Amino acid sequence: MRTKMEPVILACTRIWLIIISCLVIISIVGDVGVMSSSSTVAGLLSYQYYETSCPQVESIVTDKLTPILLSDPASSAALLRLLFHDCQVQGCDASLLLDSDTSEMSSSKNFAIRNRETIGIIKTAVDSVCPGTVSCSDILVLAARDAVAMSGGPKMKVLLGRKDSNTSNHTLADASLPAANTGVGEMLSIFTKRGMTVEESVAILGSHTLGVSHCVNIMDRFSRQIIGANRTPFETLLALRCAFGASISNSGTVGNDVTITKFDNQYYKDTSRGRGLLKIDSDMSTDPRTAPIVERFAQNQNEFFKEFTAAFLKLTSANVLTGHQGVVRTKCNAVN
């Protein structure tokens, strides 16, 4: 026998079911909205791109890269630089991995690029498990991502699904890559074209925390002949470190900061104290658009890591080849 309360209970139950259903729908729509936003930025890239075709790819890259970085810690900086030079020109398409004339490379802005062979080694290991599936450009992004993490930097999740270009244009690379004397305004223009905020633009330059710079790229910092009031103590130190100037510019180097194999916020600490190595490093510490951000990153490493992660995702997702626009190269240093 039904009580008088049963209809009320049933009605309330239906209402709660409707409310729960609406919340689920809102949640799904919200997730789709986020995915759509990512798709707008990254085209056909996905975090799960190789989930069924090569689910082991990330672990293979890490396993092959670990002994290389342990034996040569400077490789972290080299891989990160290789990625930036590749992505800066035509988008991350592995075009910089293609073999080119040695003399052409030695006279270009890419003369110090190395570790291209590392990507080929990893590609061979990946293809032994998933033949013809993973692009060289995706392997390069994963290797650079791991190089940052293994050096103490943030552990980043990256989108995958890039295809490789079958062309390489080092003349275009020289025209597209910023010069050593690039100023703050030009730097911001370069990175905002890839959708970065001012904070992210300053953060992506934090990659300078790894590795060294060649004397040829800092000649303008100590080119003044009169030592004294016209030079800061740091500029005098640089002049001594690169004592022979242009005559050994391709071999003389200076550490970007005092922890050249560790990905940390030391770069910003040095820059904020007037010890920025490159012109852009020095200028960022005084330009009103960037100086507060440099100071904030110098004081808060987690803030730097957060902005660097966002910038890395945007840089590696901009203007990439996807779907049928490119190929998956058999060898990273040669066209198919």
Image (cartoon, rainbow, N blue to C red):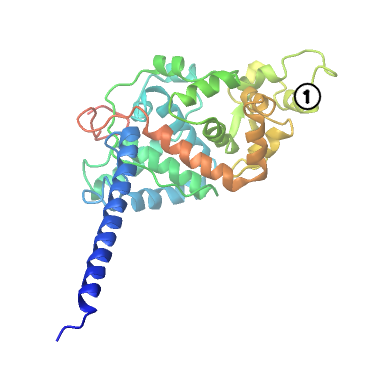
Residue 315 position, x and y percent, is: 43, 32
Q: Residue furthest bottom?
A: 1
Q: Amino acid at mark 1?
A: Thr
Identify whether 249 is placed above or below 116: above
Report whether 199 appears left or right of 25: right
Identify whether 7 is placed above or below 63: below
Identify whether 53 is placed above or below 311: below
Q: Nearer the viewer, residue 69 or 268?
A: 268
Q: Residue 115: tell me if it is visible.
A: yes
Report whether 3 appears left or right of 183: left
Report whether 294 appears left or right of 333: right
Q: Nearer the viewer, residue 38 or 242?
A: 38
Looking at the rendered structure, the secondary structure element under dot 1 is: helix
> Residue sitting at 22 percent across and 69 percent down?
11
> Residue sitting at 21 percent across and 40 percent down?
132
Which residue is denoted by mark 1 in the rendering?
Answer: 236
Q: For the C terminus, which image quadrant?
A: top left
Residue 129 position, x and y percent, is: 24, 50
